[in-house]
Image (spheres, rainbow, N blue to C red):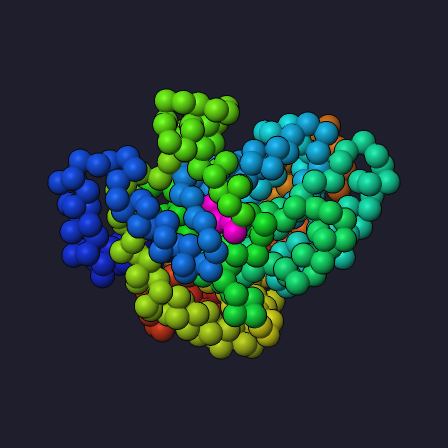
Amino acid sequence: MQFRDLKQQYAVLKDDIDKAVAGVLSSAQFISGGPVRELEAQLAEYVGVKHCITCANGTDAITLALKAWGIGSGDAVFVPDFTFFSTGECPAAEGAVPVFVDVDERSFNIDPDRLEEAIIKVKNDGRYTPRAVAAVDLFGLPAEYDRIKEICQKYGLLLLEDGAQGFGGELNGKRACSFGDISTTSFFPAKPLGCYGDGGAVFTNNDEWAAIIRSLAVHGKNAENKYDNIRIGMNSRLDTLQAAVLQVKLRAFREYELADVSKAAELYNEAFSDSGLVLPLVNAGYMSSWAQYTVQLPEGADRSAVQAKLKEQGIPSMVYYMKPMHVQGAFAGTYSADADCPVTEMLCGKVLSLPMHPYLSKNDIYTVAEALKEALR
């Protein structure tokens, strides 16, 4: 059994993907070919924003957003404590201070109450200037943007939506990657919409920021001449082969994959209804794209032993994430390490992610569920 079955996905999409790749090989336009701009237009339309700028990966997407805003030394960026490292790494790499905020124990996303407390604390401390909130759509579920936006407006902060795992999710009919002043996503192969290598994208409705980001992504070039460099930028482009693959995958994602992965989640919920596990919660008005299906094990369960028993039966599992951001060694001895995040610490000890993708069969799901329940017994 595969954790995320990219082999099966390719088998289903093989003819279209092979044709798309062959088209790029025949054109020899490997960088900035036609499929790149076509994909950008398709992604912008799907998300519901004016601008999409593709780039080399999701980490670069965050970096490009921060650079466009001029965030750097002396600035504070508020980041959930329970997330992948890049959300905190990118502000730190720009010279800013990531301030880690605890999360909600059911949604896994940044807790708006704790966010406001952290902002007030930083303002009162006076050492750093609050500039932005980097909210993450963890495991496919959009963060609580209604409240987060109110808090950002109240304190004059920019909102960055890190939708690396959230592409395809929705809140009140509005799609993920449209909630931030700037939003970003990743096309890492295992993401809800993934390519066959690294890739990412930046989304915004702001014309000025879009132009700056497009310039920054290609060495700070002038819009009309790539050899006229008007700012210090970086080299971060989505290549044409990846764009061609993503065009095929986006069609499948829209037509049936998102619906099928939601059905898989429903089957998991049904199979685990009497298990004693804490199941992922999707509140009214929200839709998850199910980048992961993550449960919380009962108090006292030996997670390593459970994983070993699943592995014996050929069932893969993963732990996202086993260590809070504020205790990562990279932040040791810094302001960022001074965070009070008990919910994150609890989750890091209890979460377990199970195989999840649109091509899971009903039998696969019941096999996983019975194996996990038996392992816990």
Quarter of the view holding residue 278: bottom right
Closer to the camera in the image, 285 or 225: 225
* Segment colored magenta: 201-205
Q: Decide whether residue 166 is among the magenta residues.
A: no
In the rendered view, does 178 fall on the left or right side of 119? left
Q: Give the residue at x 30% y 61%.
A: 251
Which residue lies at the image location 51% right of the left edge and 55% below the top edge? 177
**In the rendered view of the protein, which quadrant contains the N terminus?**
bottom left
Does the magenta segment cover residue 203? yes
- Furthest-right residue in view? 124
Residue 75 lies left or right of residue 60; in this view the side is right
Q: Position of residue 39 (x, y in %)?
A: 33, 50
Q: Which residue is located at x 15 percent, y 45 percent?
A: 22
Say if 266 sits above or below 64 in the image.
below
**Residue occupying image coordinates x 39% and y 66%:** 258
For the question of whether residue 274 can be seen, the reply is yes
The majority secondary structure of the magenta stretch comes to strand
Between 47 and 373, the one lying in front of the other is 47
Q: Nearer the viewer, residue 124 or 212?
A: 212
Residue 139 rendering spot, x and y as whole percentages: 52, 57
Left-right relation of 161 to 233: right
Marks counted in the figure total: 0
Q: Is residue 196 left or right of residue 131?
A: left
Of all residues shown, which one is farthest toward the left? 26
Quadrant in the picture for the C terminus: bottom right
Q: Is residue 121 above or below residue 292?
A: above
